[in-house]
Amino acid sequence: LSVEPVEPRYLLWGPAFITYIIILRMSVQASQKTSRYIRSVIFQNSDVREHRSQTVMTDPKSMRLIWIDCEMTGLDIDNDRLMEIACMVTEGDENLTIGPNIIIHQDDVLLANMNEWCKTQHGKTGLTEAVQQSTVTEKAAEKQMLEFLSLHTPPGLCPLAGNSIGRDRQFIEKYMPNLAKHFHYKSVDVTTIAELCKRWLPDIAANTPAKKEMHRALDDIRESRLQLLYYYDNIFKRNQ
């Protein structure tokens, strides 16, 4: 039996090929480690997220909505202040718990500098006079709201709900930061559904219950909830 001699070029390529395979394998392993590292950085709160996910599934309170409405001296977050704040907590389409409705004292100079719309509207509803007579500070109001919400909702898990709720959240974040931390970062903005209905379901939008536009905190969130229930009955429920 004769064995043909191996050409020198194959002898040279053999070790090189083996080296290439080793380097390639090391590269893949390094890439996998890098990928795991990147995921750990991006999802650095994965333990918290996992805990939150389990909490949402096991704690029915996490499915509740926190309804809040504020009346302010205006919409300028740097110069205007809170006059009234009210809240309620709902679960599903029936369960409802009314929370505090608090009138907050503000300085007469601030009230005198309100724009004409605020002067007229808050004067007509009696809110301006009530604010002048109130002795409740923003800090005290924040404490009352937190005490109520802590009894009915887990911290950081329940969305804020209402009409154009983004502006209310901004004022709460600035003047009641501890209360703001209790809300989930997501919101249920009824105004969004209303605007989409105008464009996509005009027949449903046309029959939306008329608002009384009281511009008092508790009255407004009650109307917002009834508005959302109307959309639930006429849009979401009918498609189930």
Image (cartoon, rainbow, N blue to C red):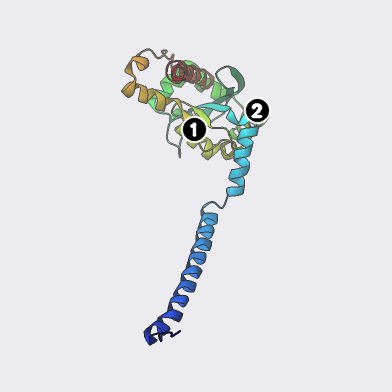
Residue 58, numbered circle: none
Q: Residue at x 54, y 32 (%)?
A: 159
Q: Position of residue 146 (x, y in %)?
A: 63, 32
Residue drawn at x 51%, y 61% as measured from the top left: 32
Q: Nearer the viewer, residue 234 or 12?
A: 12
Q: Residues within 10 Å of mark 1 (few under 14, many from 20)?
A: some
State whether residue 107 appears in this view.
Answer: no
Q: Which residue is mark 1?
A: 187
Residue 137 occupies which quadrant of the picture? top right
Residue 182 versus residue 142: which sits nearer the camera? Answer: 182
Confirm whether residue 50 shows in the render.
yes
The correct choice, above or below, for 95 with respect to 27 in the image is above
Q: At 56% across and 27% down in the image, what residue appears?
A: 65
Identify the element where label 2 is drawn.
Answer: helix
What kind of residue is marked 2?
His
Q: Which mark is residue 152?
A: 2
Q: Which quadrant, please, contains the N terminus?
A: bottom left
